[in-house]
Image (cartoon, rainbow, N blue to C red):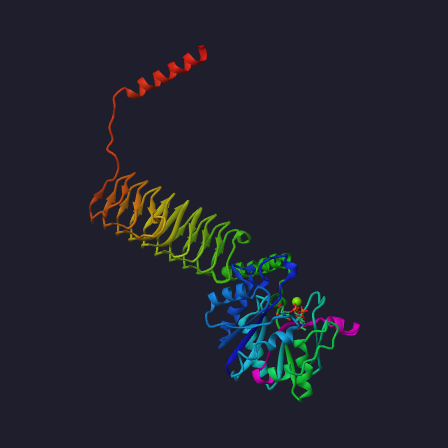
Amino acid sequence: MDLAVIILAAGMGSRMKSDMPKVLHHVAGAPMLIHAMRTAQNAFAKKIVVVTGYGAEAVKKSAASYDDTALFAHQATQEGTAHAVQQAASDLQDFDGDVIVLYGDTPFVQPETLQAMLDKKRDGHGVVVLGFHAADPARYGRLITTAGGQLEAIIEYKDATDAQRDIDFCNSGVICADARLLFSILDDVQNDNASSEYYLTDIVGLARARGLTCAAIACDETETMGINSRTDLATAEVAFQTKARRDAMENGATLIAAETVWLAYDTIIGRDVIIEPNVVFGPDVTIENNATIRAFSHLEGCHVSKDAIVGPYARLRPGAELANGAKVGNFVEIKAAQIGEGAKVNHLSYIGDADIGSQANIGAGTITCNYDGVFKHKTEIGARAFIGSNTMLVAPVRVGADAMTGSGSIITKDVPDEALGLGRAKQENRIGLALRMMNKLRAAKAALKKG
Ligand code: UD1
Ligand code: MG
């Protein structure tokens, strides 16, 4: 059966004290909303509907940039979680399948957990709810289950008796139901409760009143961690990093000082990769087997192939692609550039919008002058080329295979294969002039002191 996922993202998140909608705050290198969307995608959702409210335009923009097939519904006034889900009804009126509701501020629910809910529903239940055993149940809704494991009701904290508040099995907010059943039951939800809100949680009681059974499954509490404040955001980040570092190590990478390495939600790290202390990974980075990322490097949107060495103090920006055995050394920035197999850019360089051939050697201080103030231009360096230190490559420009440039050259014209390109003033030596100039200056200083 097809799956649609509705993501509730209408809340302002006043406790964030932010001008930005809560769900757009980043955790693990992406807005929390994108984590929920990714979970939906990885659970093979056919449709994703994001329910917007506060900051709808910004939320839509962020969601659409991640998935341009995402649908949107708007909740103009926040009248509760059931009311929010109802807003998605028109987007899903022709949809015949399962629906799962996620919260945009609960980023770590795993696709496997959604699959487990769908599997549970196949046992014939009307509604399946995702619960967790809370270390501190606080103000979560409580799941009331029978001895046989069926779910009888969800009682909101505000409406719960003391005995019900003693239950530690809590509602994560994630629910699963058949689409047609869900929207039909939602029409029956009332707001006669302590908050005068339309509670999504009421659908359990209403489904049972229609003679259906409901069930709850449990997941780890870390998956259902909701984010309401900056402190929660930091706590969530730590939880994510702890798990991501452990996963990387379990997959065969060495993290010398694991607690100083920052990973993103989609970082891919191969076997026998060594990551030295204080390395930061932004989104969309792949490190292949046997590569080494040395201390204090910053990487995002890049691909590092086998046996490559990066850093210390290197910056790989989006579009940096290092082939096998390439070396990028200290204080080097690479952007939108391919560094060929075994090529070296070892010191103090900027390589942007460039294609560097295999085994080429880029001397210290080389800059690709890629930007003329309006357009970006490309630099091509052939295989085995040797670029002298402090060469300015004024793009568009091409240095051929096995060619060289003289140190300090400003290269504005293509250099043919096997040629030496020299673009610098010819040196002249004036014999004795240094000493004569110095003597003159010293005499001037002595005259000043006297007078
Ligand atoms: C809800 C659940 C509670 C559960 C808890 C888990 C209900 C009635 N209660 O309570 O059982 O233990 O989540 O965190 O569902 N939202 C909207 N529009 C609205 C109201 C809410 O989009 O009108 C969104 C919020 O932005 C948030 C999510 O829905 O992302 C949950 O709403 P929230 O007000 O935090 O619900 P809780 O009271 O925490
Ligand atoms: Mg909440």
User: Vertically, is 443 above or below 310?
Assistant: above
Which quadrant is home to the C terminus?
top left
In which quadrant of the rendered view does residue 441 lie?
top left
Q: Position of residue 105 (x, y in %)?
A: 60, 65
Can the viewer see residue 437 in this picture? yes
User: Vertically, is 82 above or below 345?
Assistant: below
In magenta segment, residue 174: yes
Can the viewer see residue 45 in this picture? no
Residue occupying the point 55% across, 53% down: 259
Residue occupying the point 48% across, 67% down: 64
Front residue of this view, candidates 330 and 199: 199
In magenta segment, residue 99: no
Magenta part of the chain: 157-181
Left or right: residue 412 versus residue 149 is left
Q: Position of residue 344 (x, y in %)?
A: 33, 48
Q: Where is residue 162 in the image (x, y as percent from the top left)?
A: 79, 72
